[in-house]
Image: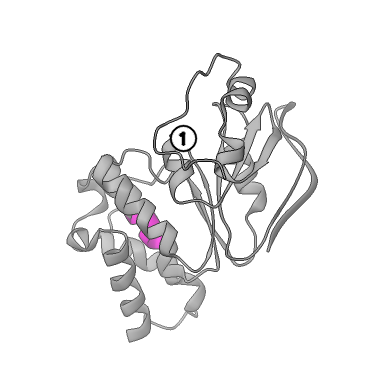
Amino acid sequence: MLELVDRTVRYDGRVALDRVSLHIDDGERVAVCGPNGAGKSTLLRALAGPGAVFVPQQTPEDLALTARAFVMLGRTAHLSPWRRPAPADHAAVARALVDAGAAHLADRRLDAVSGGERRRLAVALALASGAPHLLLDEPGAQLDFVQRRALQALLASLDRTVVATVHELPFGSTCFTRVVLMSRGRIVADGAPADVLVPDRLAAAWQCAVSALPEILPPRV
């Protein structure tokens, strides 16, 4: 499981997380939503620890590596300093590239792919790690509509714990079983998407009027 208990995080004297407590059971898929500066990325970093892979928003674009070699970095925890990747490591990388929709990029250099393609490769690296907990900061950023749909299907199919920050509320409501809504460093709502992503709660978090929800939000039961 992943857990925070009364956690406070400050950056240069500014409170980014304000006494936040959160418990996430193994196998849950949790979307963390909220306005810019709400503390979403900080929450994700605070959850990182043994058995968790954190994928940041920005993927290095100047590494002189092929995409395959970059994704192989996800296998680092499985390799001793003197052991070369084994067939099982190469198989895990190949499978992760396919699952992330990035197999066609395997031999491309990282500095020769688009921002959206780097996002898919970062997800592939996390998948290749085999870590039971994936912490993804804006995994849908720079992906087009078709790529986001494919990522939604992938995340929904994983038998791992997934916690991801999201900006697009439809993305947060379709492949996640739980939504954590944040504002000003605090969790202001936590529950099923249909219970959290409602106009009054969204309006309070963003401090603006919200008159309707995205049409693809599942109906409340």
Residue 192 pos. (x, y %): 60, 46
Give the residue at x 27% y 54%. 64
Give the residue at x 32% y 45%. 148
Which of the 4 quarters of the picture holds residue 20? top right
Q: Is residue 123 magenta?
A: yes
Query: Which stretch is magenta?
Result: 121-125
Residue 122 pos. (x, y %): 38, 54
154 is higher (above) or lower (below) than 115: below
Q: Secondary structure at mark 1?
A: helix
- Residue 62 visible (yes or no): no
Task: Locate residue 182 relative to residue 3 in the image: left or right.
Answer: left
16 is higher (above) or lower (below) than 172: above
Q: Is residue 112 magenta?
A: no
9 is higher (above) or lower (below) than 5: above
Give the residue at x 34% y 61%. 70
Q: Main secondary structure of the magenta part?
A: helix
Which of the 4 quarters of the picture holds residue 86? bottom left
Residue at image mark 1: 169
Quadrant of the rendering where the N terminus is positioned: bottom right
Residue at the extreme front of the image, as rendered = 221
